[in-house]
Amino acid sequence: MKIGLFGINFGLAADAEAMVRIARAAEQAGLDSVWTGEHVVLPSPRVPPSPSEPGTPILDPAVALAHVAAHTARIRLGTGVIILPQRNPVVLAKELASVDVVSRGRLIFGLGSGYLEPEFRAIGAPFEQRGAVTDEAIRVLKALWTMERPAFDGRFFRFAGIDAHPRPVQRPHPPIVVGGMSRFGARRAARFGNGWYGFLTDVEATRRSLDWIRGFVAEGLRPPDLGEVEISVTPPPPVTADTVKRYEDVGVHRLIPLLQARTLDDGLRLVEQLGTLV
């Protein structure tokens, strides 16, 4: 079981010094990865299903991970998740490839389709079509990262006669991890993902999503070249050795506990505790 840490770009870790201290401690403790979250904006006042208070500091994932990359050497850098239908995938391909280059090939690209309608409205992104946009944007990213002469002709995006550099260090591209606890998320992971990610997902909900994924694979929906779906989960706290065993038993490959800490010292103690689970 790999052990990561979620929340390296918001709350306590939105402070640049704290971010670096925690990321370095995670690397020294043997953790596999650190992960960012994303919300470009949050509803104010807070209304369901918003996950955080509107004043919560959240740094841009690419900026945060590039900063962490400059102060670490081995730990992997995950986006958990970038809300893909809110992004222009042509611009995002450049940003993420740049992170992979400056980190020397440590990026894990986690994506989701989003769920906060006020956020979509503020950005001007199509909330009702977010699933279709997400599927097409994944294909756009792969085209820009892998094709010698990138071209695409889809419903939402089209281009030809262009090139896009840098290419990612990882070939054919950084691992693509699809987040989402619905059947739609499971289907997307089976079709396009190197992995699947469940956020604050308990064991039973994880088992349900894995059954869906396995069903879609059995139906022949998964391209053979993608191989096995790597399963990552941020479990509800607390995380103990028993937690690791229960998730391992249902087929999870990586646990990414939430950085729950009010002070830097608390955060560093949590990282030390997680290191004992590695």
Image (tube, rainbow, N blue to C red):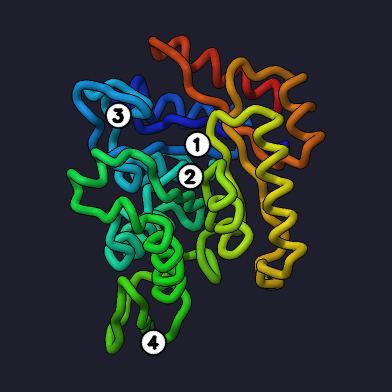
| Rendered image: mark on residue 77 | 2
Residue bearing the label numbered 4? 149
Say which quadrant the C terminus sits in.
Answer: top right
Residue 193 as seen in the image, left or right of residue 162? right
**Badge 2: residue crowd in 10 Å (few <14, some 14–19, many ≥20):** many
Label tally: 4
Mark 4 or mark 3, whichever is nearer to me:
4
Q: Secondary structure at mark 1?
A: strand
Q: Amino acid at mark 3?
A: Ala
Instruction: Give the x, y percent position of residue 275.
Output: 64, 24
Q: CA distance from mark 1 to mark 2?
A: 5 Å
Q: Amino acid at mark 4?
A: Arg
Residue bearing the label numbered 3? 16
Q: Secondary structure at mark 3?
A: helix
Instruction: Give the x, y percent position of residue 76.
Output: 53, 45
Q: Amino acid at mark 2?
A: Leu
**Badge 4: residue crowd in 10 Å (few <14, some 14–19, many ≥20):** few
* Upstream in sequence: badge 1 or badge 2: 1
Mark 4 or mark 2, whichever is nearer to me:
4
Q: Amino acid at mark 1?
A: Val
Q: CA distance from mark 3 to mark 2?
A: 16 Å
**At 66% from the left edge and 39% from the top edge, which residue is drawn?**
254
**At 66% from the left edge and 72% from the top edge, which residue is drawn?**
223
Residue 88 vs residue 187, the one in the foreground = 187
Q: CA distance from mark 3 to mark 1?
A: 15 Å
* Upstream in sequence: badge 3 or badge 2: 3
Q: Quadrant of residue 273?
A: top right
**Badge 3: residue crowd in 10 Å (few <14, some 14–19, many ≥20):** some
